[in-house]
Amino acid sequence: MAKQKKAPRPKAITPKGFRDYFGIEVTERAEMLHQIAGVYHRYGFEALESSAVETVDALGKFLPDVDRPNEGVFAWQEFDEKDNGDWMALRYDLTAPLARVYAQHRNELPNPYRRYAMGPVWRNEKPGPGRYRQFYQCDADTVGTASMAADAEICAMLSDTLEAVGIPRGDYLVRVNNRKVMNGVLEVMGLGEDQAAKDDVLRTIDKFDKVGENGVRKLLGKGRLDASGAYIDGVGLSDDQIEPVIAFLTSKADDAAKTFENLRGAVGGSAVGAEGIGELEQIGDLLAAGGYGSNRIEIDPSIVRGLGYYTGPVFEAELTFEIYDEKGRKRQFGSVSGGGRYDDLVKRFTGQAVPATGLSIGVDRLLAALREKGRMGGTSTGPVVVTVMDRDRMADYQSMVAELRNAGIRAEVYLGNPKNFGNQLKYADKRNSPVAVIEGGDEQDRGMVQIKDLILGAKIAETATHEEWKERPSQFEVPRSELVAKVREILEGQAD
Amino acid sequence: MAKQKKAPRPKAITPKGFRDYFGIEVTERAEMLHQIAGVYHRYGFEALESSAVETVDALGKFLPDVDRPNEGVFAWQEFDEKDNGDWMALRYDLTAPLARVYAQHRNELPNPYRRYAMGPVWRNEKPGPGRYRQFYQCDADTVGTASMAADAEICAMLSDTLEAVGIPRGDYLVRVNNRKVMNGVLEVMGLGEDQAAKDDVLRTIDKFDKVGENGVRKLLGKGRLDASGAYIDGVGLSDDQIEPVIAFLTSKADDAAKTFENLRGAVGGSAVGAEGIGELEQIGDLLAAGGYGSNRIEIDPSIVRGLGYYTGPVFEAELTFEIYDEKGRKRQFGSVSGGGRYDDLVKRFTGQAVPATGLSIGVDRLLAALREKGRMGGTSTGPVVVTVMDRDRMADYQSMVAELRNAGIRAEVYLGNPKNFGNQLKYADKRNSPVAVIEGGDEQDRGMVQIKDLILGAKIAETATHEEWKERPSQFEVPRSELVAKVREILEGQAD
């Protein structure tokens, strides 16, 4: 008889493109989301938490990204004896579920409906370094109003949010543009119904950040040599056609009135272009009335990200301070949030166009920025560790730790094998403990405990002279009854 | 040419068994999880957030529930050109991912490792009324120690947690039992290696809550008539075999010492039974040292839930106050949390048994309990609504709302069509607004605003006499410069 083969052990790994978050990574994100929710709430937005799973039908199968139509969602078919079960999928963003929720509940929801949502989304994409298939989004949208006051409010809220989480004024800028102005430009270019040419123009405009005015000029015309020496074919437009695009992209002036004048030049007699400029003017007036000056929010026609996706105003929040990239070069931190107006939100479901506008914050990028600014990501302080000198006296240690916790102090008793005391101190070190409590039989007989300041101890061990070491002891013996008071005193000293 | 058929509109519905959460449902849960995390943190537990998706391999395909081995997970195969992609699945609990994380990162994690995790889990089960396929769990586990101090700590933490979220002492009880004592009972019953008989006994014990001592006696013996008149076959044990089970289930006495004496009687000469009793005694001593008396945590051998799954101590938190069920009958609220010791956590991955103990809180049940106690689930207060009397003066309204928000007051401007003023007040009503602000052209000319106390207004409309109505006006005209102060005054008055 053949020997039965044992099933191989499963591998302890996350699926490709997924990761775990530990300790402070989790709590800092939770804290930041809590602060953001506070601002959204103050603006009158209501929380919404839809389920992670939607029908594929409701979701629309694919990501709304023209460049990668085949990238998609994680989907599966509901079991059904006739193999006819519904297809379900993990949400890929928070906007598609909002559309479904709004269409489903529109009769009960207030109108307009301001809602915020925060949580993970999933993308069935090829993972890459630092690019995960599950990540957090944090959105706020106003559904059911075409008023520019909704767009202005979103911009003001974005500005308040960045300051609330710890990005100081001056270190960020919310920039506003409008797709309709771009449409006006396309109109005066005389491309008529040539959608392919229009798409080419939009794609080229999207490269403005990288290639600059001259680059765009060449790419719209005959083409250009790129950095690698390869020749990139141009769109083949005439100078007359190219000029309005350049005028649009470079229209930003020192004051808003002049910017609007430049834009009016770029869109010429286009009605939709004029409408777009009018919308930007309204937004500007509303923000000024709210006290949001150009040091926080500005009209900037060179912002082109999202122009393809949205239908009216678009916004982008950029952090303007410099960081060093992985190659040691200085660069601006860049975008942490984007949004805009999209008017077909629920049309797929109901046949009725419903205007909507909103923003999405890149939670992980914003966290990275806060760490960069030193506002977050300090090492977390571990618990006070009550060491175990005598395993039969666990009840005594348990009562110490209970006293500390009841006093609001983070504390734990060592639960590993207490035999080797060195291991207990190593554990306290790994836990980043600020204080260790030690009570051996000798101390117990005398009614005393030893309290060790581990932060000071580490500092002294690193740098102190012998004199300093004698003057500033890092270990104290106090009566057992003074345990909580002494630990608190040390913790307060460390916090200074 | 046939007319092209338009694709049918997708249905705006959640998949079967899933639901949306709105407003206060979301924020109250977030608040409760925040409070729980605070207690867990104070106890030295570290946050862990693993991804929602695991390999099916790592997860172990099915729920750890012997009664429903075919119920399972939502799973799909990763796309791969050779149709050979990995199978992935949504996690069905937070314990299986902990096992994977611990096996994967054990060399970097502190040992013992105390971790907490909170988040949604997904079950591919038939949905039923009030039974969803996505729900929240909130777990805390200590991995890597066999010490009963870990189990005692989990019980103390559970007690502190319930009080922290608003369940007063006296309204809950944490009950502790031990699987080993049960094993001791099975040993003295002389069932030997007859696993089927042992499973029958465990299943019968599980019915103790429902059928009581006499019911268990009959079910272990010849059988019994159930409520519907059907005859249920018994396990067919002798009275001698049944007696230790009954002694075990009814061993609880008024004081712990007497309970332990009864248990010793039930397990007779069984070594594992004695070991289990010893563990319970240790837990009792440690909790007493921490000040946790039997008004919070007690040893209770009649707790049988989970005895099949765990390997040592088991815990259960029950809320002891009475509620009315859907049929209007009084009953105890019941269990909101359970847990225990399980020693094979990572063995599947590494071949090494690692001891672990932990608890899981039923987040939705605990929320329901808090609502039942009136600790949560009041209606949420909506924002102050600044109405729009003249749509050309949106900037004025915007500046009012900005002032209110900057003062920390939740406020919004009405963004719908302002034509019909009645609709604006209806909207404010739907939003549960406490205050409406009104400024028409007439008020503006005089530099005044109207402020309407909507809560008082509603009260007066319901109950007041004409005299009271004159004495306590619910609408005030104040200078524009006093807008914020007057709104704050009204809000503070409403809070009293």
Image (spheres, coloured by chain):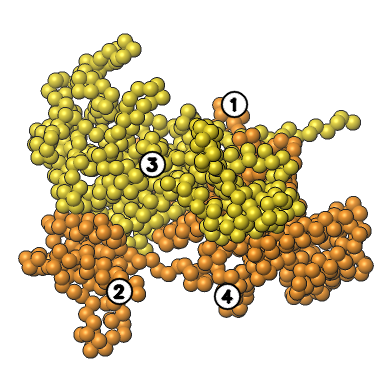
Chain colours: A yellow, B orange
- Label 3 resides on the chain identified as A
Q: Answer whether labels 4 and 2 touch (C-beta < 8 Å).
A: no
Three-letter amino acid code of the residue under disc 1: Lys
Q: Residues under labels 4 and 2: Cα distance?
A: 33 Å
Identity, as a three-letter code, of the amino acid under mark 2: Gly
Q: Distance of mark 4 from mark 3, alpha carbons?
A: 47 Å
Disc 2 marks which residue? B493
Q: Where is residue B68 shown, x and y percent of the image? A: 70, 53
Q: Which residue is mark 1?
A: B82
Amino acid type at mark 4 = Ile
Image location of residue B143, percent across then percent down: 67, 45
Disc 4 packing (10 Å; few <14; some 14–19; many ≥20): some
Q: CA distance from mark 1 to mark 3?
A: 48 Å
- Residue A16, image quadrant: top right
Q: Are marks 4 and 3 on the same chain?
A: no
Q: Secondary structure at mark 1?
A: loop
